[in-house]
Amino acid sequence: MKNKFLFSIFFLTLLIIPGTFVLADDGGSNTAGKPVTFRGEVLTILKEQYAARDNGQKVKQQNLEVGILDGELKGQRVVYNGISDVDVVSANTYQVGDKVLVARSQDEEGHNIFYVTDFVRGNSLLWLLILFVVAVLLVGGKMGLRALMSLVVSFFLIMKVLVPLVFLGYDPLLVGIAVSFLVLMALIYLTEGWNRKAHLSVLAIAVSLIVTALLAYIFSDWSRLSGATQEEVTFLIEASKQAIDFHNLLLAAIIIGTLGVLDDVVVGQVEAVAQIREANSNLSKSQVFKMAMKVGRAHLGAIINTLFLAYAGASLPLILLFNLHQEPFISFSQVINNEEIATEIVRTLVGVIGLCLSAPIATIMAVRYGQGKENKG
């Protein structure tokens, strides 16, 4: 058993490490007609100055000398002229020794122009990933290992199956549903094993996902949501060779986003029913259902608050924008009828409804088809 556990850790390492190398070294790629990106190191800060915005905020601008660390220009020194009249909201401030990403493009006369676009964050992300894996393994043991393996499989399915198929022109909704079921089976069977409780969890989540998908389709269509309000859509339209149905992409995002919390609630309910029956096998089905639902209601309250706080945290800049009372957010009517806001409302409420329905669905299935002896009732 110990050897099997060690083999599983080795297998997980083989899956994770290649991805970390991508995080640590993503420079030097070259695509015809597009800027080339290199990794570099800030050698000298040539000049600094502050630019003032209308609201009084000051932004530091810099001219830098950067040494190229990889690619065809490795070892060369280039100059980035970051001081200009253009107001860059997200401008970074760099120090000597910082590892940065350097993009090279050419002007109309064929001269090279270099831009420092961002920090190289691969090393910090790599160490965070290692700390994450160690924490999960130390606390979760074998169950934590299985959870990590299911996470890797889920990541692989989304990045290597869903994304390529969408770019090939397949319907994002159909692809999203198919990948969601594959992710679902990976989540459940890798963490829970091949047993009756796992089968019940898969079935209950599948039913809950179908209900969530129907609700998302009905209310997104009723609310006339296009799915094309995010800034990233503009880049997708320009970069993708195939037309993407952004409405169905939104539906796929809702389904995949809901899957994680459905897994938490459903597995918890199936396990609650099993534990109640193990504690008292003489309880009737109706008694088991009522007791398990008390657990489910307490769990739902915590999960719903978690969902709200997660969305609020991610949308904090947008929440601040509401309170400026400027177009397009002057009145409450304008706020809720703005498509970007309406999209988040539909996404959140549909997910919560699906979450609420998953608890009784899972409990009924576990009570009816789970193992254990019980009186009729």
Image (spheres, grey):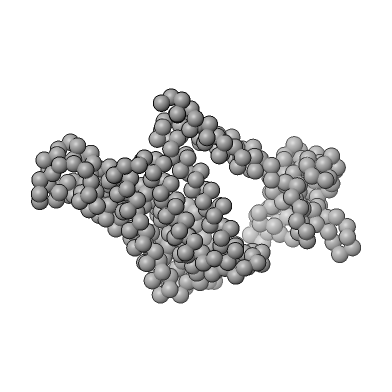
Q: Position of residue 65 (x, y in %)?
A: 82, 44
Residue 290 visible in the shown view: yes
Q: Residue at x 37, y 49 (%)?
A: 263
Residue 90, picture quadrant: bottom right
Residue 255, picture quadrant: bottom left
Left or right of 215 on screen, residue 48: right
Q: Position of residue 332 (x, y in %)?
A: 43, 70
Residue 246 visible in the shown view: no
Q: Position of residue 35 (x, y in %)?
A: 76, 56
Left or right of 269 on screen, residue 1: right
Left or right of 179 on screen, residue 167: right
Q: Residue at x 46, y 43 (%)?
A: 150
> Camera-side residue: 327 or 212?
212
Q: Residue at x 41, y 46 (%)?
A: 187
Q: Is residue 281 depicted above or below 92 in this figure?
A: above
Image quadrant containing the N terminus: top left
Q: Residue at x 72, y 39 (%)?
A: 98
Residue 272, picture quadrant: top left
> Camera-side residue: 306 or 264?
264
Q: Position of residue 160 (x, y in %)?
A: 57, 52
Left or right of 175 on screen, residue 1: left
Residue farthest to the top, as pictured = 2
Q: Across the whole image, how many numbered discs are drawn on residues?
A: 0
Q: Is residue 40 depicted above or below 335 in this figure?
A: above
